[in-house]
Amino acid sequence: MGNQDRNNRNVAENIKDTAGAAFHSIHKGLEATENAAMNAVDKTAEAIDNVTENDNKRNGR
């Protein structure tokens, strides 16, 4: 194998590794965003439950 072939393969591997690392980083970012969104949904649902429960207690339900 000549030097040019070896260099071409190294470049291709580096591109592949960089793309893989970028994909992994983006995926982790999306997971973090999803977790934050679900936490917000959970907290909102909890707040609604608390308001509804308090309203029911006031109205004798």
Image: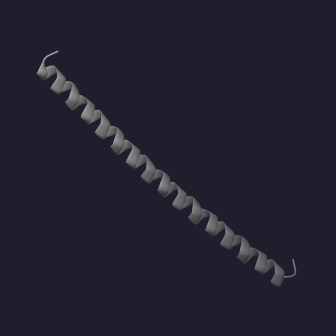
Q: Nearer the viewer, residue 61 or 30?
A: 30
Q: Residue 20, image x and y in percent? A: 35, 38
Left/right of residue 17 with respect to residue 55 in the rendered view: left
Left/right of residue 29 with respect to residue 36 in the rendered view: left
Identify the residue at the far right of this view. Answer: 60
Residue at horizontal 83%, vertical 81%?
57
Left/right of residue 29 with respect to residue 57 in the rendered view: left
Q: Quadrant of residue 45?
A: bottom right
Q: How is the image coloured?
A: one colour
Left/right of residue 61 with respect to residue 47 in the rendered view: right
Q: Residue 11, image x and y in percent? A: 20, 31
Residue at horizontal 13%, vertical 17%?
2
Q: Residue 27, image x and y in percent? A: 43, 47
Residue at horizontal 12%, vertical 22%?
4
Q: Quadrant of residue 6?
A: top left
Q: Residue 30, image x and y in percent? A: 45, 51
Q: Indicate whether 30 appears above or below 50.
A: above
Q: Indicate whether 54 appears above or below 27.
A: below
Where, quadrant-wise, is the N terminus in this rendering?
top left
Identify the residue at the far top of this view. Answer: 1
Where, quadrant-wise, is the C terminus in this rendering?
bottom right
Q: Indicate whether 32 appears above or below 43.
A: above
